[in-house]
Amino acid sequence: MKLSFKLYPFQPISENQKSIGDIIILHGLFGSSKNWVTVAKALSGFGSVYTLDQRNHGDSPHANEHSIKLMSEDLEEFLSDHQIQNPILLGHSMGGLVAMYFDFTHPGVLKELIIQDIAPRSYPFVYEKEIASMSFPLVGFSSRTDIDQEMEKYLPDTFIRQFLQMSLERMDSSEYRWKLNVVGLNQARRVFDHPFPEKISSETKVLFIVGGSSEYITDADKSMVEETFSHLTIVSIPGGGHYIHYTHQKEYLEILMHWFQNKN
């Protein structure tokens, strides 16, 4: 599948700085490249940054099938089409699972791996409220405010509603539509169910950034991560949840900037 993407060309911070290579950012479930503009601009000081829309998200094509394996294959096709070698992959949530799957099945291809708040294991599909809030007909709605009020009946969390609404698009006819393939994603409820090969290990240098209060990472997960990745750094952001690239953006960017500055 040919994925939509945004490119942030390398813009060195200092006169003598050299590019550390291409950086590719993979968003999470219900996200898109739009969620990563600030992070991508910051990282473009170290190398060219590509923010991808994964299948069934953003401006990328919709498909009936949606799995970690297929998204990894989409990524492989993207790298081949753009002649990108030894990239640095940054993946959040679903994007982190895709990044790890790619690493496990393509040993030695990645230069580095950065994973945000997800472990290499199965996760339940616990997004019924999100799906319901995007499943009612949008015909007749004339404003985002009206849509948000209807969404609130299914999804009380204002932050998550605003996150989802980044994929809400107004068409020329003044009607709204979801860029997300809501039906397809609802049918892919096993997307996080045993997404990896039976034996997983990696020699890739990897940075894990986790939220200190996140429900997605347990102590057992941290132990498993330590056993899986032989060149590992784990950094926790106190009080952070699953969306630390947004809710704790200052701390998050400081971690990334420190990580990349040490390479020059």
Image: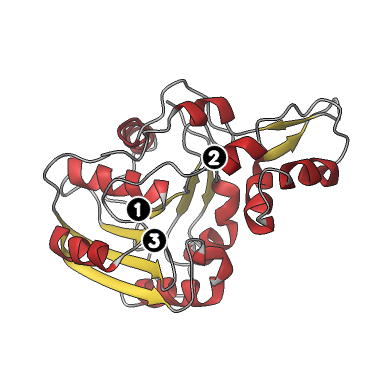
Mark number displayed over residue 89: 1
Q: CA distance from mark 2 to mark 3?
A: 21 Å
Position of the N terminus, as image quadrant, is top left
Figure check: 56 above or below 96: above
Q: Residue at x 30, y 33 (%)?
A: 69
Mark number displayed over residue 147: none
Q: Residue at x 48, y 68 (%)?
A: 12
The first of marks 3 and 1 along the sequence is: 1
Q: Is residue 14 visible to us here?
A: no
Kindly report which numbered mark, 2 or 3, lies closer to the viewer in this rendering: 2
The first of marks 2 and 3 along the sequence is: 3
Q: Label 1: how many residues lie within 10 Å, few (<14), some (14-19) or many (20+)?
A: many
Circle 3: residue type: Asp
- Residue situated furthest front in the rendering: 153
Kindly report which numbered mark, 2 or 1, lies closer to the viewer in this rendering: 2
**Residue at image mark 3:** 117
The first of marks 2 and 1 along the sequence is: 1
Residue 178 screen position, x and y as percent = 67, 33
**Residue at image mark 2:** 128
Residue 175 screen position, x and y as percent = 82, 29
Q: Secondary structure at mark 2?
A: helix
Q: CA distance from mark 2 to mark 1?
A: 29 Å
Circle 1: residue type: Leu
Q: Quarter of the image holding residue 124?
A: top left
Q: CA distance from mark 3 to mark 1?
A: 14 Å
Depth order, front residue of 82/14: 82
Q: Residue at x 73, y 36 (%)?
A: 169
Circle 2: residue type: Glu
